[in-house]
C-alpha cells in the first residue's frame, strides 16, 4: 500500500500522517526517518518545525551561558542539567519538545515525577527522552520562535507540571530574563530586586543574566548566581 505523508518541508523531509497524534509523533521521533537537524516539537496537536539557523550571539552563546552555569550548580550533587536535543514529553499536556536547557533533580527522579525513557536497544544507561515534569526548563527566544516560546509553550509546560520556567530574550538593547514559578497551574513571574536578582524556587538561589562587550564588538553572557 502506498505510504501517505501530511507535509513535505524539503526534498527529504516528510512528516508522516501518523505523527499528527501524540503517540504517533513519539514513534516518529524514535524512528530512523526523524530529521537529525532542526527543532521539531509536538504542541497539543500542532507540529512546530524550526529549521532556521541559530543566531550566534542572541541564541547560541546565551544558551551555552545558561546551561553551563546550571550544569556547574547541579551536576552530580543535586541532579543533572541538559541542553540541545533533550526531549521532554508529557501525555497530560500532549507535549513533546526540546527546550534550550533542562534541569532534573535527583529527588524528582526518585519520587517518580519525571523518568528517563530507555532507548530501543535497552542497553543500560542509554536513554532517549524524559517523561513527566523536569524541575526547570529554559527557553531562549529567537526571531523564529518568539510566539512559541512566549505564548504556546508556557501553558503546555504548566500543564505538564514543570515547576519552573525561565525565558531569556537578548535580541534587543536590554536583556529580558524572567524566572516563572508554577502556582495553581499558571506561571507567575518572580519579582526581581532592585539589582535584577530573581530567586529560583527550585534551586534556592538568586540569578540574573548579564552581558559584557568583547574586543570584536559582540557580547558574551554570564548567568550569575548567589544565595537568595
Image (cartoon, grey):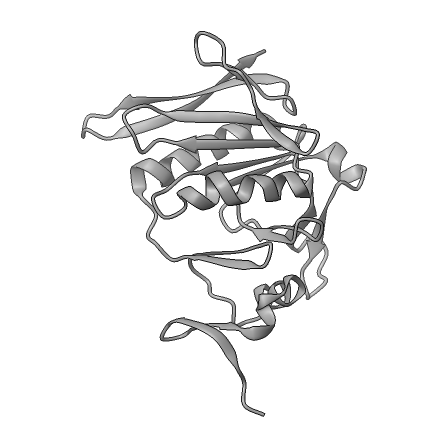
Q: Residue at x 56, y 49 (%)?
A: 86
Q: Is residue 112 left or right of residue 175?
A: right
Most extreme residue toward the right is 111
**The C terminus lies in quadrant:** top right
Q: Residue at x 41, y 46 (%)?
A: 145
Residue 52's x, y, as percent? 34, 54
Residue 122 appears in which quarter of the rendering?
A: bottom right
Residue 144's x, y, as percent? 36, 48
**The N terminus lies in quadrant:** bottom right
Most extreme residue toward the left is 216
Residue 168's x, y, as percent? 43, 31
Residue 216 appears in which quarter of the rendering?
A: top left
Residue 27 against residue 191 in the figure, above or below = below
**Looking at the image, can residue 31 be seen?**
yes
Q: Residue at x 49, y 9 (%)?
A: 193
Residue 195's x, y, as percent? 43, 9
Amino acid at each position: 500500500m502506498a505510504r501517505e505523508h501530511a507535509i513535505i518541508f524539503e526534498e527529504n523531509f516528510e512528516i508522516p500522517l501518523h505523527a499528527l497524534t501524540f503517540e504517533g509523533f513519539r514513534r516518529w521521533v524514535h524512528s530512523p526517518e526523524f530529521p537529525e537537524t532542526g527543532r521539531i516539537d509536538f504542541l497539543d496537536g500542532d507540529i512546530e518545525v524550526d529549521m532556521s539557523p541559530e543566531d550566534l550571539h542572541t541564541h547560541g552563546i546565551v544558551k551555552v551561558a545558561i546551561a553551563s552555569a546550571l550544569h556547574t550548580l547541579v551536576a552530580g550533587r543535586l541532579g543533572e542539567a541538559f541542553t540541545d536535543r533533550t526531549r521532554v514529553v508529557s501525555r497530560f499536556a500532549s507535549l513533546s519538545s526540546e527546550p534550550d536547557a533542562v534541569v532534573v533533580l535527583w529527588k524528582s527522579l526518585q519520587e517518580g515525577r519525571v523518568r528517563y525513557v530507555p532507548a530501543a536497544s535497552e542497553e543500560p544507561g542509554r536513554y532517549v527522552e524524559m517523561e513527566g515534569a523536569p524541575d526547570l526548563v529554559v527557553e531562549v527566544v529567537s526571531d523564529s520562535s518568539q510566539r512559541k516560546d512566549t505564548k504556546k509553550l508556557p501553558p503546555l509546560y504548566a500543564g505538564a507540571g514543570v515547576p519552573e520556567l525561565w525565558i531569556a530574550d537578548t535580541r534587543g538593547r536590554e536583556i529580558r530574563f524572567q524566572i516563572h514559578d508554577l502556582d495553581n497551574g499558571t506561571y507567575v513571574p518572580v519579582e526581581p530586586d532592585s539589582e535584577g536578582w530573581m530567586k529560583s524556587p527550585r534551586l534556592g538561589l538568586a540569578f540574573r543574566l548579564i552581558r559584557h562587550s568583547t574586543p570584536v564588538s559582540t557580547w558574551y553572557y554570564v548567568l550569575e548566581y548567589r544565595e537568595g
